[in-house]
Amino acid sequence: MDITIRKPTERECEACGRREVWNDATGTWRVAVANDDRRVGNVYCIHEWDINGTFVPIESDGVDADA
């Protein structure tokens, strides 16, 4: 059974609406841009990212090694 650990690639602050995407080239989060709209949010916000338990970081191929 192969297991892959995934990481989130986007996030949104529940308080101010800031949206960020992960940039593999720089290894950092960047403000998301869609249709020339940058969702930067509030500069004074202590961002509360949309961590609600729906993202599952462990992904398996579904094949049991004992089968």
Image: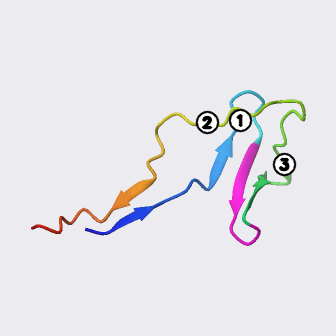
Nearer-the-camera pick, 36 or 38? 38
Residue 13 magenta: no
Indicate which disc, 3 or 2, sits on the residue closer to the N terminus.
3
Q: Is residue 14 above or below residue 38?
A: above
Q: Main secondary structure of the magenta part?
A: strand
Residue lying furthest front in this view? 66
Identify which residue is drawn at 73% across, 27% down: 15
Tell me the quarter of the picture where residue 42 sits.
top right
- Gap between marks 3 and 2 measured at Cα: 20 Å
In the image, which disc is placed on residue 13?
1
Residue placed under numbered mark 3 in the picture: 37
Q: Is residue 64 left or right of residue 44?
A: left
Q: Is residue 37 left or right of residue 28?
A: right
Q: Label 3's element?
A: strand
Badge 1: few (under 14), some or many (20 or more) residues near its Cα, within 10 Å?
A: many
Would you say the residues marked 1 and 2 are in contact, meaning their CB atoms lie under 8 Å apart?
A: yes
Would you say the residues marked 3 and 2 are in contact, meaning their CB atoms lie under 8 Å apart?
A: no
Residue placed under numbered mark 2 in the picture: 50
Indicate which disc, 3 or 1, sits on the residue closer to the N terminus.
1
Nearer-the-camera pick, 19 or 36? 19
Q: Is residue 19 left or right of residue 67?
A: right
Kind of residue indicated by mark 1: Cys
Where's residue 56, x and y in %? 44, 48
Identify which residue is drawn at 31% across, 69% down: 2
> Which stretch did the figure color magenta?
19-26
- Gap between marks 3 and 1 measured at Cα: 16 Å
Residue lying furthest right in this view? 43
Where's residue 36, x and y in %? 85, 54
